[in-house]
Image: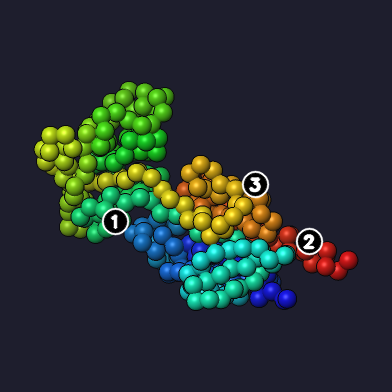
Amino acid sequence: MSTDYDIIIVGGGPGGLTAGLYGARANLRTLLLEKGLPGGQIVNTHEVEDYPGFEKVSGPELASKMEQHARKFGLEVRTANVEEVFCDGDDRVVKTDDGQNLRARAVILATGGSPNLLNVPGEKELAGRGVSYCAICDGAFFKDEIIVVVGGGDAAVEEGIFLTKFGSKVILIHRRDELRAAKVIQKRAFANPKMEFVWDSVVEKINGSQKVTSVTVKNVKSGKISEIDCGAVFVFIGFVPNSNLVREGLDKDDAGYILTNHKMETNIPGVYACGDVRAQLVKQITNAVGDATTAAVAAEKYIEALHDKELV
C-alpha cells in the first residue's frame, strides 16, 4: 500500500511549523495537522521578545510569518483533530476524528502541552496582560513590580527565585503550610530577601481591567479574604504534555513527557518528538524550533534508509 505522505507532523506550534519547513524544503511530501490556528500557544501570546532576530513581535505575527515561510516551500497544512498514531508495518498511521487514516513513513509529534489553570475569574481575561505560565518568557516585562507566584513545587519555587531578578518583590502563594519543592530549592528561596510567602491560601480572583493590578486571596483555614497588590501573576501548578496519541509502547518519563535521543527519535522507529511534549529542561520557542529541525532532518535520513532497503 502506498503512503499518502513522507512525513506527517501532528501539532502546528513553532516546532511543528519548523519541522514542516524543513520537511517540505527537503522535497518530501509533508503534511501538518493542527486542531486550532497554526502557531499553537504563541497565537495567544501578547508579545514575544526572546526569539532571535525579533526584538519584540506579537505572538500572532510570529506565528503567521512561520506559517507563510513553511507554506512557501510546499508544506500542506490542514485543520484536523488527531485521535491516534499507530504503526502498520513500515507505515505510520495518523487517525483523525473524521475517520481518516493518513499514512506516512515518519511522524513528528509536536503536540505540546498545557499548563494547569487556576480557573478563577480574571485568569483568562488577563492572560498575556500580567497572567503568565512562563517566567523565562515574560519575567522581564515586570521589572520593579510586585510579582505573585502561585504554587509550591519545584517549578513554582525555582521560577519564583528567577523572577526576583526582575520584580521588586516576589510573593509566593501556596495552599499548604509548607512547600513541596526539594529542600535545596526551598533553602535558596527562604534565603532570598526578595521572596515572601503566603501560606494556607488560594487565589480566588485576579483583578484588573487592561492589566493585572491585584489578586484576591482566601486563607483556607480561617476563611479570611484579603487583597494583594501586584503587577503580574505567574501560575505554576503543573503542566500536562499532550503525549497520549501513541497509546502503546511509547517511552515516557514519570510526568508523561516523551523520551527521545539526540536525534529526537522516540523508541518507536519513524516516530519523533519535539518541543514541549518532549522531556527536556526548558519550554521555549527556540527549543521547539531546534528540536524540530533535528527531528525533520533525522526523519529525512530515516525515510532514505527505508527507500534504500526497498530497493535491495
Crowding at mark 1 (Cα within 10 Å: few <14, some 14-19, many 20+): some
Measuring 56% from the left and 54% from the top, which residue is drawn there?
A: 274
Measuring 58% from the left and 68% from the top, which residue is drawn there?
A: 94
Q: Position of residue 42 (x, y in %)?
A: 41, 60
Measuring 41% from the left and 54% from the top, which residue is drawn there?
A: 114
Task: In this rendered view, identify the residue nearer to me: 181 or 56.
Answer: 181
Measuring 42% from the left and 69% from the top, which residue is drawn there?
A: 36
Report the mark closest to the observer, 3 or 1: 3
Find the distance from the CA under tag 2 to the CA under tag 1. 46 Å
Q: Is the Cβ of the residue at disc 3 closer than 8 Å to that at disc 1? A: no
In the displayed structure, 258 sits above or below 154; it is: below
- Report the side of 53 relative to 302 (left or right): left
- Report the side of 251 relative to 156 (left or right): right
Q: Which residue matches tag 1?
A: 127
Give the secondary structure at mark 1: loop
**Amino acid at circle 3:** Asn
Task: In this rendered view, identify the residue nearer to me: 311 or 275.
Answer: 311
**Amino acid at circle 2:** Ala
Q: Earlier in the sequence, mark 2 or mark 3?
A: 3
Q: Earlier in the sequence, mark 3 or mark 1?
A: 1
Find the distance from the CA under tag 2 to the CA under tag 3. 18 Å
Residue 14 is labelled as none
Q: Which residue matches tag 2?
A: 305
Q: Position of residue 312 (x, y in %)?
A: 88, 66
Q: Position of residue 272 (x, y in %)?
A: 62, 56
